[in-house]
Amino acid sequence: MAIRRRIVAGNWKMNLDHAGAVALAQAVATGAHSCGDCNLILCPPSIYLEPVAQTLELTNNAGHSGVALGGQNLHDQPKGAFTGEISPTMLVDVGCTFCIVGHSERRTLFGETDSVVNTKAKAVLAAGLTPIICVGETLEERDQGRTAAVVTEQISGSLAGLSAADLAKSIIAYEPVWAIGTGKVATPEQAQEVHALIRKQLAEHADEATANQVVIQYGGSVKPENAGVLAAQPDIDGALVGGASLKAEDFLAIAEQFAHAS
Ligand code: PGA
């Protein structure tokens, strides 16, 4: 099996204020050295991208903290009359190298379909950014035994038309909707089963070597207490963390466990 990178991303959602965002970024950057080879990404609200970018740049003597910056969402067009939106080039401009697309909150609260997610993922890649493409079933779908079917459909719709090279540059996040913000984490076995299924589908979409390179994160109530068992699973390469990413100590403790997982 290929040795994949470990990547833990913090999705701050619509939280914090300017001072809080800067303080959190500072604390994460200061502690990042303890996370070894695990790469860290911070995804603040878009209005705080620039101050967080400045904080990450200024943190250590080398001029860069090693912590990367990501958007939470974007519009697929580079510019134009799209009131309230931000473009891929704007994300690049302020120092982002990643962007989350198709988070379940975007899908359910803002009506983003697989086709919208696909268009956004392509725009992210075209701008030279790495998309973190989110998929995951609802509790109802899981209870009906439809998890595999739902995730398979989301993956094929969201990745339609992406080349093997595009895929190799992308991150997939499996986030069961019933585990997001609920405190109910998927068991390591439940998560691993879906991660393995996704990797198999990536191999069918592209090829096995590419599939073995793709980082697949788990998301949904990841905390320092459960990160270790998740990180120990063969196909769980990192985490997309919501609530626990708002505390630097917890976020770093999660990343440390991914860094130490063999
Ligand atoms: P949570 O959110 O960690 O608060 O469950 C995860 C996410 O929405 O990415």
Image: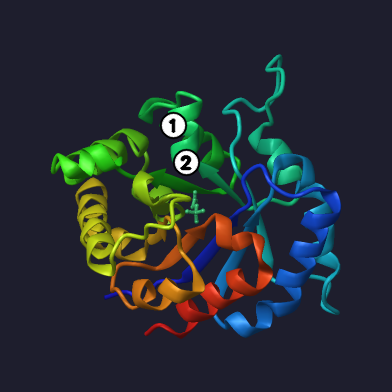
**Would you say the beta carbon of the disc 1 residue lies within 8 angstroms of ligand 1?**
no
Type of amino acid at the residue the image marks with label 2: His
**Would you say the beta carbon of the disc 2 residue lies within 8 angstroms of ligand 1?**
yes
Residue 39, horizontal then vertical, whole percent: 57, 70
Q: Tag 2: Cα neighbours inside 10 Å, few (<14), some, or many (≥20)?
A: many
- Which residue is denoted by mark 1 in the rendering? 107
Residue at 86 percent of width and 79 percent of height: 61
Above or below: residue 172 compared with residue 139:
below
- Image quarter of the N terminus: bottom left
Above or below: residue 113 compared with residue 196:
above
Type of amino acid at the residue the image marks with label 1: Arg
Above or below: residue 117 compared with residue 130:
above
Q: CA distance from mark 2 to mark 1?
A: 6 Å
Secondary structure state at the residue bearing disc 2: loop
- Which residue is denoted by mark 2 in the rendering? 103
Answer whether residue 102 is visible to the viewer in this image.
no
Residue 179, horizontal then vertical, whole percent: 38, 52
- Residue ranking furthest to the top: 81
Asked if marks 2 and 1 touch (Cβ < 8 Å), the reply is: yes
Between 78 and 177, the residue placed more toward the observer is 177
Q: Tag 1: Cα neighbours inside 10 Å, few (<14), some, or many (≥20)?
A: some
Residue 220, horizontal then vertical, whole percent: 42, 55
Between 225 and 4, the residue placed more toward the observer is 225
- Residue ranking furthest to the left: 145
Residue at 82 percent of width and 77 percent of height: 62
Residue 167 as seen in the image, left or right of residue 8: left
State the image quarter where residue 2 is shown: bottom left
Residue at 37 percent of width and 85 percent of height: 262
Residue 133, horizontal then vertical, whole percent: 44, 45
